Amino acid sequence: MKDDKYKLLSQVAYLYFIEDISQQKISEKLGIYRTTISRLIKEAREKGIVEINVRDFDTKIYALETHFQMKYHLKFIQVVPTDLIDSDQEKDEGISRAGAAFIKQRLEKNSIIGVSWGRTLAQTIGCIENRRNTHSVFVPIVGGPSHVNTRYHVNTLVYELARKFGGSSQFVNATVVQESKALKEGISQSKYFSELHDYWSRLDLAIVGIGGKLTVKDSQWRDLITSDDYEDLEQREAIWDCCCRFVDRDGKVLKGSLYERTIGMDLTDLSRVPTSVGIARSKPKAKAILAMLKRGYINALITDEETALEILKISDDLYLQEYLA
């Protein structure tokens, strides 16, 4: 037979968890101090009178996200679970849906949002549904490619975001890489470009992709890079790019002729944006993502489990063994 204390614990727990009655109302109903009600609820959980289960929540993935968040001081991270039988298309769709959800949740009214471009970001924006008015401003943070499917062009992505979130858009009318430093400076210092620069300095949110290996020369904009540029980048061990800025394995931005001819936000400026999120996945990009995290160029990340584990592996992170155990 249960004693009176047990019955009281059960009654308080039932009122609080099942009837959804506030602790103050329970206090008034039972004639017990509010602070005592709080203590009784805690005791009911400790004695197993109350058992709380959360369905469809992967505690292992959550622990992995927590590890990354603490180690790299991230404001947000989401790791999308993967399975060995998942195709690349399924994995891409997974982080695109996660990226779309992040943008919808984090985009506040009257914000200024900067966007780079690429296939992953195009897929992410394509997953956004349920339009709403935010009166925000959407701007490109890189120049455009020379010729590419308009679906991936930065102006297209900016326009689509503005359309889906009831905002306005600014466009860039220059290719990301110019023929000379003088041409680039002429564009960057023009009256037309000054408004864009002003927006860059006031971004609330930046959404960026992360490029792949330097050896992939058939991407959406690298036809603008000369053979001399490639030779220089290879000699300096460039491995990836973000916002069309090439970086080595340690995350150091490689400055030189190509850098001086490139129209795009500097990664140091990207690191100052209140929320800068990278959306990227795949094992080949793990080194790039790791460098972005270590340098603090981004403070939010959306990736998948396969990529996160590869980052642990290449960084000799001891947590990998704990996770796989």
Image (cartoon, rainbow, N blue to C red):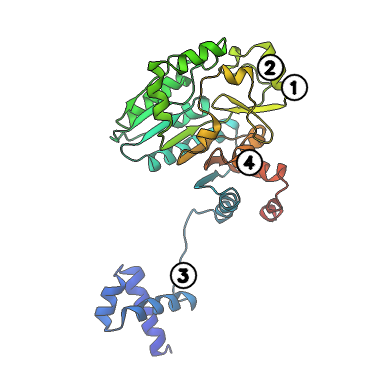
* Residue type, numbered disc 1: Gln
Q: Quadrant of residue 283?
A: top right
Which class describes the residues within 10 Å of circle 1: few (<14), some (14-19), or many (20+)? few
Q: Residue at x 41, y 34 (%)?
A: 203
**Residue situated in front as seen by the camera: 266 or 318:** 266
Residue 89 image point, x, y percent: 56, 30
| Tag 3 residue | 51
* Residue 230: assigned label: 2
Is tag 1's residue or tag 3's residue first in the polypeptide sequence? 3
Is tag 3's residue or tag 2's residue first in the polypeptide sequence? 3
Q: Is residue 290 above or below residue 123?
A: below
| Tag 4 residue | 306
Distance, label 1 to label 4, CA atoms, is 30 Å
**SS of the residue at dot 4?**
helix
Residue 317 image point, x, y percent: 70, 49
Residue 64 visible, this orientation: yes
* Residue 145: assigned label: none
Mark in the foreground, 3 or 2 = 2
**Residue situated in front as seen by the camera: 52 or 37:** 37
Is tag 4's residue or tag 2's residue first in the polypeptide sequence? 2
**SS of the residue at dot 2?**
helix
| Image quadrant where one finds the C terminus | bottom right
Q: Is residue 135 above or below residue 226?
A: below
